[in-house]
Image: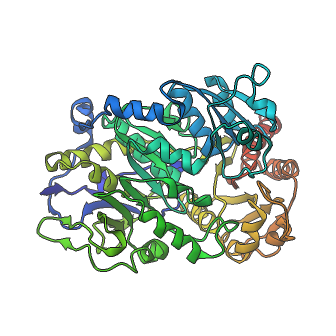
Amino acid sequence: MEFSAISPSNSLHFPTNFLEKIMTHFMVRPRNATFSCRTLQIQTLASNLEESSRVSFSTRSRADIKNEESLVLGNRKGWIHFVGIGGSGLSALAMLALKQGFEVSGSDIVWSSFMDGLKEAGAQLHLGHSESNIQRNNGSSLPDAIVVSSAIPQDNLEILHAKSVGIPVYKRANWLGKLTEHYNLIAVSGTHGKSTTASMLAYVLKSMGDDLTAVVGAQVPQFGGGNIMSGSGRNFVLEADEYDCCFLGLLPYIAVVTNVDWEHVDIFPDEEAVKAIFRRFLKQIRVGGHLILCGDRQCSAGACSLLDDREESTVADHSSGKLSTLNSDKCSDGYRITTFGISRTNEWHALSIRPNSQGGSDFVLVIATVMALVSDGRQSYESINCVKIHLNNFVGVSRRFELIGTVCGCHIYDDYAHHPTEVRAVLQAARQRFPLKALLVVFQPHTYSRLAALKSDFATAFSDADQVLVTEIYAARETNVWNVSGKDLATSIIGPPSEYIPSLGDVVDKLAHQISLEPDRETVVFTLGAGDITTVGSKLFHELQGRLQK
């Protein structure tokens, strides 16, 4: 099969706000495909978008839908209560349940932005945990199921009461397994980049005509439902999280592994433990399924290592451009493997690698996954064209290089980066995009365990910044048994001058005063972290407006 090359002038250029942890700009092609020299014309393709950019996808049968609805609650829509509903993972499942017609309630100890959307959609929400949250009519009415976040301890009052009165209690992993078992599940996993990759994939498939369902752990403006899509098609795109071994409850048709790094140090004692859990995840792939993973050791040695202990049982057929079915004893059911990356040894790899003006790169993984879903060879060339068009329209994911606002010469961005690899990547992208601007970084460490384990890696991650402010640690679910603080990181940062300012309010005051002294100086401020640091950017923006735009 022949595919046209994508010319440099028409290769994909994406806005930085959705580029997550990949720093090169590239074009893609299947390793074994023969190329012609024809140039793709985006304008011509775009004018026929309704006709040419849609691919046929199957819909779910009535039996599948009935099996899903009767899975836990019998043959009726019922009441589901979510404990820890404010988190990114559980809030998405709660919103999906609402979209599917279930009655939803939930509780958490603090209010989150995710809960705003749930409340508007009709969920009954509670601050704090109590037996009364799962009782109505003096206890005569109870939820049909309780779904529990991985961050909630088992001695939670609501969990204990639910078990005492016989309400089924599901950890998130078990619920996800039941929720997705009647779909073609595309599980997007990896230490970094899951949210962006899953969102990008779901958006492209939806734009190509697939009435899919999708759940991701971040707000996606183009989803309409915040962080979910609810459809009637057979495909389900899921951000598959390794935290608390959550993805081991899944049986994916396609498993995507973006990269593997040591993360969630409160769960995994070292990188080998992370690799071990990912190897177990690969064994969950369904018969006849597909594994798509990064094949470059320089990009992710951890992901490559997942295949190191396998026999050479997947052999590329260079004449057909296809892979044979795996017959390894370690995966006796059999699935195909496709690799992506920069090296030419990968089935999908980059060409003409160069940085772009947006500070980021194009992304190959979505294309590889879409091609795995489109089995009809006649549609393959058309599908590549369609993917290219729709990716150009993808605006990104919240809190990924997200512009909060600009006041005079100050540009304020917010990003979710909370791991050394992520911090280093986003600041490299920022320096690439803003080579001549002063780069000020506010970093809020997330969890004591992560900072204690990775402090030396964090110390070298800020080298592209001109100034770093470190706040106190966002504790999340932890207590400080490690006796570590943000000050420990501030004093260990190598390169730019750094300062420890525990309070977020004091950070806003300091930056507002500093920037106001030179309001026309070209400055970029980045707030980084997975906690409530996300509130700092908007507060700083409004404070500067008040001071400088009177």
Q: In the rendered image of this protein, does residue 395 appear above or below residue 69?
A: below
Occupied quadrant, residue 64: top left
Report if residue 349 is visible in the image.
Answer: no
**Residue under the point 59% across and 68% down:** 421
User: Which colour style is shown?
Assistant: rainbow
The vertical placement of 172 against 457, above or below, is above
Residue plotted at (40% across, 57% down): 255
Name the foreground residue: 465 vs 285: 285
Quadrant location, the N terminus: bottom left
Residue 61, percent across and down?
A: 31, 32
Q: Position of residue 12 (x, y in %)?
A: 36, 51
Residue 283 coordinates in the image, percent (x, y):
41, 65
**Is 116 situated left or right of 18 in this image?**
right
Closer to us: 419 or 494: 419
- The residue shown at (45%, 71%) is 303
Examine the rendering and report whether any part of residue 332 can be seen.
yes
Q: Quadrant of residue 405?
A: top right
Q: Measured from the top left, where is residue 23 in percent x and y?
A: 48, 64
Quadrant (top left/top right/bottom left/bottom right) for the C terminus: top right
Q: Is residue 525 left or right of residue 315?
A: right
